[in-house]
Image (cartoon, grey):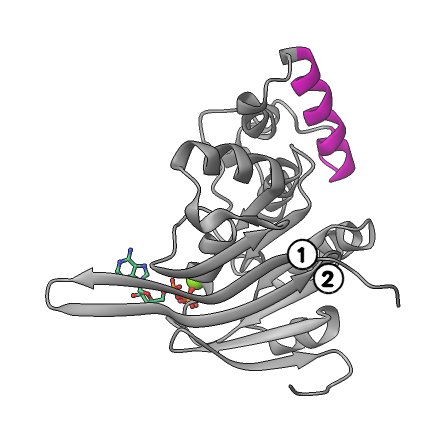
Amino acid sequence: MKNKEVIINLKNVAKYYYMGDNIVKAVDGVDISIKQGEFVAVMGPSGSGKSTCMNLIGSLDIPTKGVIYLDNEDISSLSESDLAVLRGKKVGFIFQQFNLIPNLTVKENVMLPMMFQGESKQERENVAEELLVKVGLGDRMKFYPNQLSGGQQQRVAIARSLANDPEVILADEPTGNLDTKTGKKVIDFLKSLNKEGKTVIMVTHDPNLAKEHADIVYSLRDGKVERITRKNKLRI
Ligand SMILES: Nc1ncnc2c1ncn2[C@@H]1O[C@H](COP(=O)(O)OP(=O)(O)OP(=O)(O)O)[C@@H](O)[C@H]1O
Ligand SMILES: [Mg+2]
């Protein structure tokens, strides 16, 4: 296998929340290294810090300690406005709750992330239409999210995550609200994006999903990496 570049690198990253006299150590000294094109699963019990990690990687949040490199750029020290531009371009997010905007149509939802990247309206419409066809929703462009099934809404969210052609897709329990069959379609879609070269990082509670699809599984516990399992079953 040829040498792939490290695209995401977390070095001794921590995220603490200060609640009165208590400190909640949501993430507590984590080292994660992800190479371009990898399919990564993040597992661990509820409250172990999975979503916090994803939000840090996606620069939705800033670490209390440590350094985060995204594509060789240190994002832990960028200003909020630089972060906003960066996360729009390099990272696409898919959430368990879909997080679509209810009063925008399917097409407008997919166009939204492109608003801040300077494309013309026509260009945004073209890209959104193309992506919706790609996820099999070419006939639902004018629908509103509440007129779609859960699986369809998640496919809109996938299309939206691809709007700026990001290198990395972050999916936080993307199948958590879907039945097994619909969930499988969503996973198949993520898998095909991964085959096209996208780096995919997916939080899941399902060990079978992780085992079947991921090149590498990070298991978290109490904000720390408890175990790293690679596809060839070597533990390091
Ligand atoms: N904004 C916040 N303020 C205070 N504590 C927080 C905040 N966000 C998260 N936490 C705490 O950090 C810990 C990790 O939360 P996180 O959402 O990352 O867990 P998770 O692994 O994603 O869990 P789940 O599987 O339930 O989604 C939890 O104990 C949570 O209470
Ligand atoms: Mg979570």
Q: Secondary structure at mark 1?
A: strand
- Residue 79 in percent (x, y) is at 40, 37
- Tell me: residue 154, above or below residue 146: below
Q: State yes or no: discs 2 and 1 in contact (Cβ < 8 Å).
A: yes
Q: Quadrant of the C terminus?
A: bottom right
> Alpha-carbon neighbours of circle 2 within 10 Å: few (<14), some, or many (≥20)?
many
Q: Nearer the viewer, residue 63 or 136?
A: 63
- Residue 230 in percent (x, y) is at 71, 79
Magenta residues? 122-138
- Residue 42 in percent (x, y) is at 56, 69
- The residue under the point 41% across, 68% down is 49
In the image, residue 133 lies in the stretch drawn in magenta: yes
- Tell me: residue 115, above or below residue 81: above
- The residue under the point 59% across, 46% down is 154
- Tell me: residue 201, above or below residue 221: above
Q: Amino acid at mark 1?
A: Val
Q: Amino acid at mark 2?
A: Glu
Q: Nearer the viewer, residue 147 or 96?
A: 96
User: Does the Cβ of the disc 1 residue fall within 8 Å of ligand 2?
Assistant: no
Q: Is residue 233 left or right of residue 19?
A: right
Q: Nearer the viewer, residue 195 or 225?
A: 225
Give the image quadrant in which the ligand numbered 1 is located.
bottom left
Q: Secondary structure at mark 2?
A: loop
Q: Label 2 belongs to which residue?
A: 38
Q: Label 1 belongs to which residue?
A: 200
Considering the whole magenta stretch, tell me its main secondary structure.
Answer: helix
